[in-house]
Image: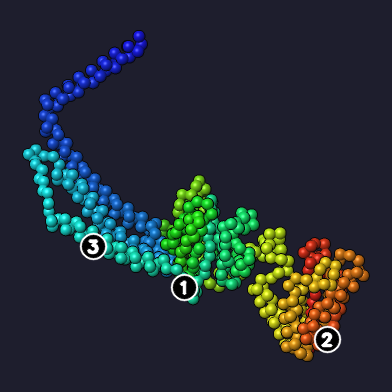
Amino acid sequence: MTGLVILLVLILLAVIIVQIGKVNELAGRIRGEEEAYYQGNDRTGLWLFIFMIIFLVACVVSAYYYKDMMLGYGPLKAASAHGDSLDSLFNVTLVFTGIVFIVTQYLLFWFSYKYRAKKGGKAYFFPHNTNLEIVWTLVPAVVMTYLVVKGLVVWNDVMPDVNPDDDYLEIQAAGYQFAWDLRYPGPDGKLGTTDFRLIDLSNNPLGQDWSDEKNADDFLPSEIVLPKGQKVRVRITAKDVLHNFYLPHFRVKMDAIPGLPTYFIFTPIKTTEEFRQELRQYPDWQVPADPTEPDGPQRWETFDYELACAELCGQGHYSMRRVVRIVERDEYEEWAASQPSYYYSNIRNTDIDPKKPYELYGAEIKARNAALNAAFDDANAQEETGTIIGLENVFFKSGSAELQGDYTFELNKVAELLNKYASMKIEVGGHTDSQGDDASNQVLSENRAQAVKNYLTSKGVNASRLTSNGYGEATPVADNNTPEGRQQNRRTELKIVSK
């Protein structure tokens, strides 16, 4: 019964609505609906035209008002060598698209007013107008051709890869949720090879191949620091999803794609401090950086270049921001020299080090030979005798005087230098740590010193120029209570006796 009542109510409501409609139609005729219709068209067309004027004026005025906050205008001009050409391309594009935008909006609203329905008005239809078709085909074609050609010129200027003989710094940026792993080359100036199959989040976040000697001096800093005026090639990779390497102030933007390495090249031309001084000239930047601290640093003082991810890569997307510091070359070199090698700090002589104990890279051998050259040259130039030169790569089996490891290169170099300075006489001194009894350590140090002396004589050094002596544990140079200290105390030294 209730359902029937509801149905009857709905039918009655529909009848009422239909009757109200008929009443309104009749009332409209009585009022002169046609005249009201035309008056409404006039008002609508006029208000649309007024809206168009306000809208276009607001676009121009707001663009001018906020120009100092837009890249390429006010203080936010490009800080890279190629940035001006990109900004110029955007400006040219803005001119043409701006003209089309204004003309299109004007015609859209003007036509709405001019061609509104009017009493006695009649539409005119024409099927063909050759001149009009030529105009709207030729003009866009010419403009697009110009924009495409200019874009290709800029692209070829911005996107070429480096030449082998170019002076450039190559770094790596690997994006992941939600941060960047950064890698710089060490003193050799070259990044080592990587393999994604070697990635270990705890010990090898970039999958560096430790059999490649170029990896030995690479370092993984927590910030991006680059020298002003240096061409930089950024090797861009991703370890999980799509990211984007975006340096807005340098007009650098490139996707970081898993499995597909990309790159970008740019040359910073303004240090962070120079850019801050440019911002300082604008009133909008001469305000407190934190409104709650009116006496705190001003906005321009807290400015930093930044690296941002320009892809929505997940909920933690915002945390991929990194500060970028551009500094003078000498400051960069000082910073780079202070960064520890990832291999030597985290991998060397650990269980995951693929190199055998005491096995050295070629660059290490070269550096050690250079240090020995300098040490002997300096000792020979001094008037006094007694200079001590430590042997850093001479090792013995535990509790034995048997040489082991890659010791030959260092002793060969010592023999070469002793033959160079033929009148120089030296004492080979052996030292041990405090483990074991004194007498055993004394004998062990004497035997180790004798073993080094024997090796040098086998390489052509006259035995009359060499003596050996063992000092046991009597002259430590470090704390014998720690493994590191004991290792330093187990040493072999050369003492210049006469020249």
The quarter of the picture where residue 34 lies is top left
Residue 439 is left or right of residue 312, and the answer is: right
Visible residue check, residue 481: yes
The quarter of the picture where residue 429 lies is bottom right
Question: What numbered label is drawn on residue 142?
Answer: 3
- Give residue 348's position: percent from left, percent from top: 69, 64
Label 1 sits on a secondary structure element that is loop
Callout 1, which amino acid? Asn
Question: What separation in Å lies between label 1 and label 2 (alpha carbons)?
Answer: 54 Å
Of badges 2 and 3, the one in the foreground is: 2
Q: Are marks 1 and 2 in contact (CB under 8 Å)?
A: no
Visible residue check, residue 293: no
Residue at left offset 51%, top offset 66%:
326
Q: Residues within 10 Å of mark 1 (few under 14, many from 20)?
A: few
- Which label's residue is closer to the chain start, 2 or 3? 3
Along the line of sight, the residue nearer the viewer: 262 or 423 = 262
Question: What numbered label is drawn on residue 463?
Answer: 2
Label 3 sits on a secondary structure element that is helix
Residue at left offset 23%, top offset 21%:
17
Residue at left offset 80%, top offset 75%:
492
Q: Quadrant of the N terminus?
A: top left
- Give residue 481's position: percent from left, percent from top: 82, 62
Q: Which residue is mark 1?
A: 163
Callout 3, which amino acid? Val
Residue 120 is left or right of residue 105, and the answer is: left
Residue at left offset 48%, top offset 52%:
242
